Amino acid sequence: MNEFPAINKIKASDLQKFAGKKSATIVGGNVVIHKHIINWMLSCCDGKGIRPFANPAFKAFTYLYFARACATIIGCDYLVTNITKRMDSMVKGQIHSEDVRALYLMNPPDVEMQRILVEHIATGFWEKTLKAKGAYRTLREEIPEFNKAIDEILDAKKKMRKEGNRAKRAPRARKNGKAVTSKAKEGEKKLDAEATPHTKGEEEKVVKLQAEVVRRASNGRPAFAKLDLASIGVSKEQFSGRK
């Protein structure tokens, strides 16, 4: 408000020049809230320090929204900062459904505030932290545009969760698949090595075997020993010559 200069920018001796001015024109805002702010400003000048700026219990968030706009018009930066902090604190908790209805249906609309309200309620639905959810469901039924905006956020969150779960499962599947493939290849190499005969000139591998004695020699009877053919890579068919 330019009709009253900032006190901290003029000399005390010059204040007398503005002493005769008893009125000012405020353009914009709400007249009731402007009166509330001015009375609050006057109460802070009675020598008892800055008083708390009160707000109604019902639709408190809505009232503070308009009070901040009025404080901005008047040029009361302290109150603007104070109200902003209080509104941020309310957003961290839960904005009342009546505040959401009032601010979302403003004409002309505040697009930024609409975005904040939608994200706030959508997050509450997603995290299942909303109290009195029925009131917000009713609000979604009343305002299709509001409901659509919430659905878009919830659908995006669902998609991100599915992609995240898929990404978590993929490394495990790739790891398991790699292990199976490696074992299969290792088995194939082993079979190939056993099935491939030695070529001419190739050094043959000498394996020392110890046969298991199943009957010892005694009284002129010969001893018998058992040899596991599988240990030297010979099958029963190969040993007996059967096809």
Image (cartoon, rainbow, N blue to C red):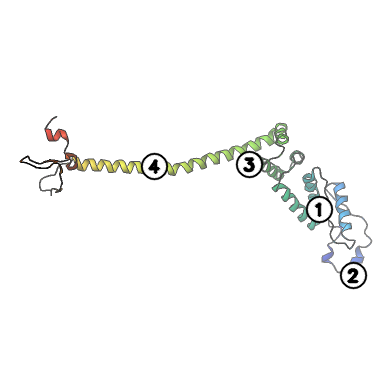
**Residues at marks 1 and 3, CA–CA distance in whole angstroms:** 35 Å
Instruction: Bin the neighbour count of mark 4 within 10 Å (Cα to Cα): few under 14, some 14-19, many 20 and up.
Output: few
Which amino acid, by three-letter code, is at mark 2? Ser
Of marks 1 and 3, the one in the foreground: 3
* Label 2 sits on residue: 13
The residue most toward the front is 219
Q: Nearer the viewer, residue 120 or 171?
A: 171
Task: Determine the secondary structure under disc 1.
Answer: helix
**Residues at marks 4 and 3, CA–CA distance in whole angstroms:** 34 Å
- The quadrant of the rendering that contains the C terminus is top left
- The mark nearer the N terminus, 3 or 2, is 2
Which amino acid, by three-letter code, is at mark 4? Asn
- The mark nearer the N terminus, 1 or 2, is 2
Residue 127 marker: 3
Residue 176 marker: 4
Q: Nearer the viewer, residue 238 or 59?
A: 238
Which residue is at 71% across, 47% downward? Answer: 91
Which amino acid, by three-letter code, is at mark 3? Glu
Task: Determine the secondary structure under disc 3.
Answer: helix
Task: Determine the secondary structure under disc 4.
Answer: helix
The residue most toward the left is 220
- The mark nearer the N terminus, 4 or 1, is 1
Q: Where residue 166 appears, x then y in whole percent? A: 49, 40
In this rendering, position of residue 134 left or right of residue 25:
left
Q: Where residue 171 appears, x then y in whole percent? A: 43, 44
- The mark nearer the N terminus, 4 or 2, is 2
**Which of the 4 image quadrants contains residue 22?**
bottom right
- The quadrant of the rendering that contains the N terminus is bottom right
Q: Nearer the viewer, residue 23 or 141?
A: 141
Residue 71 marker: 1
Of marks 4 and 1, the one in the foreground: 4
- The mark nearer the N terminus, 4 or 3, is 3
